[in-house]
Image: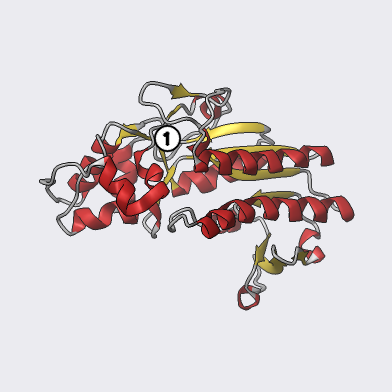
Amino acid sequence: EILNLCIQKGYFVHYLTTSTSKIKQTNTSQGFYWNLKTQEIDVNCLKEVDAIINLAGASISKRWTTTYKKTIIESRVQSVKLIYKLLSKNTHQVKHIVSASAIGIYSSSENEVYRETSTLINSSFLGKVVQAWEREVDYLTNLELTVCKLRLGIVLSKHGGALEKMSQPIKLGFGAGLGNGKQWQSWIHIDDVARLFLFSIEQKLTGVYNAVASEVVTNKEMTKAIAQQLNKSLWLPNIPSFLLKTLLGEMASLVLESQQVSNATILESGFEFEYNQLKSALTECL
């Protein structure tokens, strides 16, 4: 989505890939190789680049074994370390970096409304991941770059991701709320994610911003809205938390934790959401 938006706006994009087969050159983009394990990166990727968008990180939607948990953290931390090393050792014209982050940094709560200044930090694995990620990104300020972090909520997209996982059981007639269903789910449409990354660069935003739509809903409301969009009925009782923890292990926190997050700061900066209400976002995606 970000690449398509860049092309629409007339930006030429250099992208990094760990797969040599994905290195291609077109009229609008050029691929470059990097390898986090060997800390290898093609220095030519910096040529004429003004801003960097960092989205690198292994999926959190895979079972959290001890080994995979290490992969989740290291993929985020090592990618930023490699960018730091590249920028500190080479001449470049990069002025700005915008990095993905996540609302998982905030403690799970059914009562709190989180602004960026909140000090209630999540002690769960996901909270530790985001803290380590943001700490590494902050080091880039030492290179006199403008650094911006976007704390993303649940990203709704028609192509895979969280919405596909939430929709699948509902499509099959087995939809149900999770836990007590009262946990807050702050979300954002993928088109707004792309627009927000470019807005951050164009407006030279600095610091941290919550990247979520205005209408935060509970898990119960989210499940019901997806079912209505798919014309499916919900007849099963909620899946108990203990069962989810048995099935998913520690990863159950992804669906059971509650974060009601405010987007007031990004709205104050002048950003306008295309999808600010859940109904319109689900209509587009489903």
Q: Secondary structure at mark 1?
A: loop
Q: Residue at x 61, y 74 (%)?
A: 22
Horizontal relation, residue 133 to residue 87: left or right: left
Residue 280 position within the rendered picture, expressed as x and y whole percent measured from the top left: 31, 42
The number of numbered badges drawn on the structure is 1
Q: Quadrant of residue 265?
A: top right
Residue 193 position within the rendered picture, expressed as x and y whole percent measured from the top left: 50, 45
Residue 58 position within the rendered picture, expressed as x and y whole percent measured from the top left: 55, 57
Nearer-the-camera pick, 149 or 249: 249
Residue placed under numbered mark 1 in the picture: 213
Q: Residues within 10 Å of mark 1 (few under 14, many from 20)?
A: many
Horizontal relation, residue 262 to residue 242: left or right: right
On the question of residue 81 being in view, the answer is yes
Instruction: Examine the rendered structure and indicate whether residue 141 appears above or below residue 47.
Output: above
Q: Residue at x 58, y 23 (%)?
A: 117
Nearer-the-camera pick, 149 or 37: 37
Nearer-the-camera pick, 78 or 229: 78
Horizontal relation, residue 168 to residue 130: left or right: left
Residue 92 position within the rendered picture, expressed as x and y whole percent measured from the top left: 85, 53
Horizontal relation, residue 23 to residue 127: left or right: right
Q: Residue at x 26, y 39 (%)?
A: 179
The kind of residue tagged 1 is Ala
Q: Quadrant of residue 197?
A: top right
